[in-house]
């Protein structure tokens, strides 16, 4: 074993809550308090050592009694804030991210992407801390640069503290709607049940010390030491981003979470079509800060990187590699087939293709696809097919097949991908709904709303094919024609009658309703309480088969009666249920 690495920390939250500023403050703070070479920049990652944190947080370390109790080497902050970075930090069976900071604007609470981030963190089961940012915006708050929150709060006027408490109270209430119990960090009694809220200001640096120390406490309590242990063998990592660099060709920014990656190694990763291999030509890292002479001179080539590291890989064969793909180094060519198999298995767990019923899902990277599928499954929505990249004609065909099994699954959910115009046209003409967007839970909410509408329409269609139960009485003194056809005045005692239904008396058929008239005008139906005139066609005569005062029932075929009773009973009114029960009793006694 090569030792223990620092935990990976991802910063997430809504736009404009100060995520990047907070990261800059954490890094800047560490630079300000560092010994030479203490802070190291990686590609897409910054290492903040524990000594820098301890030095910066001085008196607070003593107050919280943390001195000498922390064994983590520091923190590896992922520099790209946002849910895409978090989603792509994936590995088989979980997340590469060990911890998350959910940044919330204390003045406006949880917003769209904040909720999105929260749901992603929950779905991955990553421990997290909430930074209630923009503390400096609290009316009347007196700020001192980089002061710990616990010291700052003791030095405020009562009204500023009262405003802060009110905001934190609102945030606690919002979080409880998502099943999260939270409290201000210094009041948390049980970190296994409550999420700590740390008030911070990314502008003044207040509360940053508290945030770093709470992170240290949470990481030591919730991350098993073995998860942070790194080996000395071939590297294992994840691709965060793939791009074209001038003079270098296609490069991959990757995070190596275990082992070593060397110049000349073969790496196996994945593209849309499956596993791909590439030979490493160059490994690029940022220079130590004290060596940078100008912005053009930021990077240097290295011979190898050890976990944990963020590195830019220049290699032949990276075209078409997708973010979120696993990355395995191969040191011996006989290990290549096994590495390809492992990568293939891992991506086939993300990409789904089955003939089961479910929705079709497309996303821009392996990471976001996996997050989307995970989220949908946790919400009880099955997935028939999941793939990376824009939807195709084949997806429309799949959605049509899925719709045959269940109309609510005739849909393509597209997360962060463009829809080719010809596919959109085909979907429209095939009656397939496409729901696309950049916010996962918004797509899900839209899908829920649409599927509810589809279910309602489908039920309405089914019910329109079924005969509704009904019960009428021929009104004495309202016989307008005795036969051929019979025309009588009736009162609807229960249920509904429509033209075309058959009427029965004592379980025997008497004829079919041809027309219903209300106040001299034809109507499509009459419901309980209505008094109408009806014409009855059939071998029937008033005075023989039927008489004034007789009670007649609508004939409901046996198969339909079963459907009403066992599938659609909730769609019958109480009077209709009663009419159906009475009709079935008369049928039973007529057949005895």
Image (cartoon, rainbow, N blue to C red):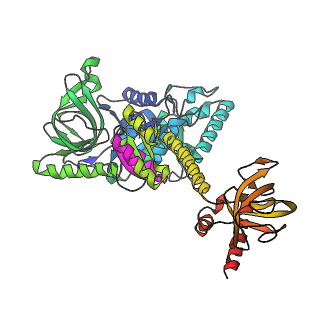
Q: Is residue 361 left or right of residue 478?
A: left
Q: Furthest residue to the bottom?
A: 592
Residue in front for this viewpoint, 294 or 315: 315
List the single residue furthest toward the top: 294
Magenta extent: 370-399
As drawn, the residue found furthest toward the left would be: 333
Please identify the quarter of the rendering in which residue 530 is found: bottom right
User: Is residue 180 at least partly visible in the picture?
Assistant: no
Snapshot quadrant of residue 482: bottom right
Residue 406's spot in the image, x, y percent? 47, 54
Q: Residue at x 39, y 35 (%)?
A: 417
Q: Residue at point 79% right, 50% down?
A: 518
Asked if 193 appears above or below 148 in the picture, the reply is: below
Image: 408 above or below 507: above
Task: Give the quarter of the figure containing the C terminus.
Answer: bottom right
In magenta segment, residue 383: yes
Examine the image and state in which quarter residue 412 appears.
Answer: top left
Q: Is residue 92 magenta?
A: no
Count of picture labels: 0
The foreground one among 221 and 408 is 408
Most foreground residue, 145 or 501: 501
Instruction: Looking at this view, name the residue that lies furthest to the front.
Output: 484
Return the residue nearer the eye: 86 or 250. 250
Residue 232 image point, x, y percent: 20, 47
Q: Is residue 47 visible?
A: yes
Give how far across and how far down residue 270 sits, in percent: 25, 42
Looking at the image, which residue is at 22% across and 22% down?
246
Residue 325: give x, y in percent of width and height.
29, 42
């Amino acid at each position: 074993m090569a030792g223990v690495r620092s935990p990976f920390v991802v910063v997430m939250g809504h736009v404009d809550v100060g995520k990047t500023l907070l990261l800059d403050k954490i890094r800047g703070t560490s630079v300000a308090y560092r010994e030479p070479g203490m802070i190291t920049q990686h590609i897409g990652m910054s290492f903040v050592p524990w000594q820098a944190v301890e030095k910066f947080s001085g008196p607070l370390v003593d107050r919280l009694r943390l001195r000498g109790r922390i064994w983590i080497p520091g923190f590896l902050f992922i520099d790209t804030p946002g849910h895409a970075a978090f989603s792509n930090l994936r590995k088989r069976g979980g997340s590469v991210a060990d911890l998350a900071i959910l940044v919330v604007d204390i003045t406006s609470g949880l917003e769209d992407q904040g909720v999105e981030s929260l749901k992603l963190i929950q779905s991955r089961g990553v421990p997290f801390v909430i930074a209630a940012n923009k503390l400096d915006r609290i009316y009347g708050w007196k700020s001192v640069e980089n002061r710990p929150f616990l010291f700052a709060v003791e030095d405020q006027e009562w009204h500023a503290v009262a405003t802060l408490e009110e905001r934190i109270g609102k945030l606690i209430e919002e979080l409880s709607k998502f099943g999260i119990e939270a409290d201000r960090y210094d009041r948390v009694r049980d970190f296994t049940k409550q999420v700590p809220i740390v008030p911070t200001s990314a502008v003044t640096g207040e509360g940053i010390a508290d945030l770093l120390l709470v992170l240290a406490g949470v990481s030591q309590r919730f991350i098993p030491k073995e998860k942070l242990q790194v080996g000395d063998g071939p590297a294992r990592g994840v691709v965060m981003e793939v791009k074209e660099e001038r003079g270098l060709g296609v490069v991959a920014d990757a995070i190596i979470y275990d082992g070593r990656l060397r110049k000349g190694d073969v790496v196996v990763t994945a593209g849309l079509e499956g596993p791909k291999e590439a030979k490493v030509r160059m490994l690029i890292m940022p220079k130590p800060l004290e060596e940078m002479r100008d912005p053009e001179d930021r990077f240097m080539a290295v011979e190898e990187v050890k976990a944990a590291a963020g590195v830019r890989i220049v290699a032949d064969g990276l075209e078409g590699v997708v973010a979120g793909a696993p990355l395995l180094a191969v040191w011996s060519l006989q290990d290549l087939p096994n590495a390809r198999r492992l990568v293939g298995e891992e991506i086939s767990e993300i990409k789904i293709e089955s003939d089961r019923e479910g929705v079709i899902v497309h996303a821009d990277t392996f990471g976001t696809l996996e997050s989307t599928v995970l989220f949908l499954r946790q919400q009880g929505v099955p997935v028939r097919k999941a793939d990376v990249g824009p939807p195709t004609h084949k997806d429309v065909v799949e959605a049509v097949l899925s719709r045959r099994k269940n109309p609510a699954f005739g849909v393509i959910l597209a997360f962060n991908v463009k829809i080719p115009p010809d596919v959109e046209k085909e979907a429209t003409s095939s009656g397939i709904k496409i729901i696309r967007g950049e916010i996962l839970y918004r797509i899900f909410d839209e899908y829920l709303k649409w599927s509810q509408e589809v279910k309602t329409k489908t039920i309405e269609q089914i019910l329109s094919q079924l005969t509704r139960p009904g019960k009428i009485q021929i009104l004495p003194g309202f016989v307008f024609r005795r036969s051929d056809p019979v025309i009588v005045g009736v009162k609807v005692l229960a249920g509904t009658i429509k033209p075309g239904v058959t009427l029965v008396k004592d379980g025997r058929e008497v004829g079919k309703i041809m027309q219903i008239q209300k106040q001299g005008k034809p109507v499509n139906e009459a419901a309980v309480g209505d008094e109408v005139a009806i014409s009855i066609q059939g071998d029937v005569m008033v005075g023989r088969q039927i008489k004034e005062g007789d009670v007649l029932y609508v004939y409901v075929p046996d198969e339909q009666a079963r459907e009403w009773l066992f599938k659609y009973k909730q769609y019958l009114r109480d009077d209709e249920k009663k009419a159906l029960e009475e009709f079935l009793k008369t049928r039973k006694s007529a057949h005895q």
